[in-house]
Amino acid sequence: MGFIEIEGMEFYAYHGHYEEEQIVGNRFLIDLKIETDCSESAKSDDIEDALNYQTAYKIIKAEMKKKSNLLENISGRIIDALYEKFKKAQSITIKVSKMNPPMGGKIKKVSITMTK
């Protein structure tokens, strides 16, 4: 077993409960960790035997373009889309962070982490 991790993916998107958030948008950071069997690709050195992290990034990018009210919804959709593509994934953990959330004070970020 092994882990594929992509950290610090940054997107500008239009997610949020409040109408202003869905109009103005905000910066989001995403960290991904996928547990998978890496033994075959470790031996073959062939990307066809590996969990292609560029494909994972493209899936996340596509999901970030779809508006959501909640970070939980974004996280769940991304996990489901990744499992649909990567049947060999044993577990997927995703952390979605909204930078500078509009909460009436100085806040660096608010995050949700989900594992399936």
Image: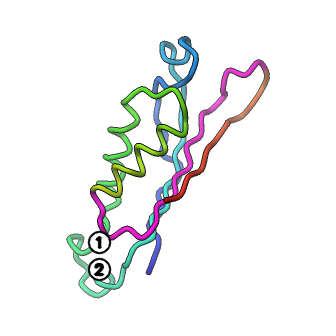
Say left or right for 77 vs 75: left
Disc 2, SS: helix
Against 5, residue 27 (above or below) is above
Which residue, as the protein is rendered here, is positioned at the far right?
Answer: 105
Q: How is the image coloured?
A: rainbow
The percent position of residue 15, horizontal first and vertical second, equals 50, 26
Against 105, residue 3 (above or below) is below
Residue numbers of the magenta segment: 85-104
Instruction: Give residue 65's quadrant in the image.
Output: top left
In the foreground, 62 or 116 = 116
In the foreground, 75 or 107 = 75
Looking at the rendering, in which quadrant would you find the N terminus?
bottom left
The residue where tag 1 is placed is 50
Residue occupying the point 49% across, 40% down: 10
Disc 1, SS: loop
Q: Which mark is residue 9?
A: none
Residue occupying the point 51% across, 26% down: 69
Residue 44 shown in magenta:
no
In the foreground, 95 or 17 = 17
The percent position of residue 99, horizontal first and vertical second, equals 62, 32
Q: Mark 1 is on which residue type?
A: Ala
Q: Mark 2 is on which residue type?
A: Ser
Residue occupying the point 35% across, 85% down: 39
The residue where tag 2 is placed is 41
